[in-house]
Amino acid sequence: MVTPSAPSSRDWPCLHVTRSGTVLDLHVAPNAKRTQCMGLHGAALRIRLAAPPVDGAANEALQRWLADQLGVARQAVGLVRGDSSRLKQVSLALPAEQVAQWLARVVPD
């Protein structure tokens, strides 16, 4: 009998381990009807975002959504790069295994 293993950071090309937690590579599409994870887009996690890309509103909405999804404070999610780009990197003050488990739940097959 084979026991399924817990998801790990090796299973997700969008997830990188750092000294202070993890970094997620994202491909963000603003102005969607609702915010949701759409799966992988190359080596990035594709997120549809229900916020306009105006005056940092989309970045703030993305960080709040990720914090809510992961059950952490908003301050635990930081924008590393991609302030005005669809391709972004966010830092998460969480262990990679915890983020990998979240990815396994939200990424469609």
Image (cartoon, rainbow, N blue to C red):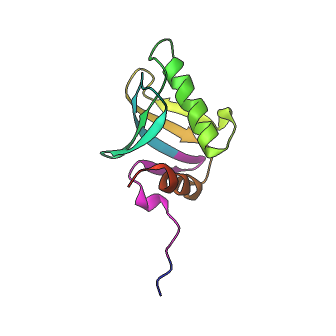
Residue at 42% x, 21% y: name it: 31
Q: Residue furthest front?
A: 33
Q: Residue furthest bottom?
A: 1
Q: Is residue 28 above or below residue 96?
A: above
Residue at 49% x, 21% y: name it: 51
Provide the residue span drawn in magenta: 4-22
Quadrant housing residue 32: top left
Q: Residue furthest left?
A: 42
Residue at 53% x, 18% y: name it: 57
Q: Is residue 52 above or below residue 24?
A: above
Q: Nearer the viewer, residue 33 or 41?
A: 33
Q: Residue furthest right?
A: 73
Indicate the quadrant containing the C terminus: top left, top right, bottom left or bottom right. bottom left
Left or right: residue 98 versus residue 7 is right
Please tell me whether residue 77 belongs to the stretch shown in magenta.
Answer: no
Residue 56, image x, y percentages: 51, 17
Residue 95, image x, y percentages: 60, 54
Q: Is residue 29 above or below residue 20?
A: above
Residue 50, image x, y percentages: 48, 25
Quadrant housing residue 29: top left
Q: Is residue 26 above or below residue 32?
A: below
Residue 86, image x, y percentages: 37, 27
Left or right: residue 18 versus residue 48 is right
Residue at 66% x, 33% y: name it: 74
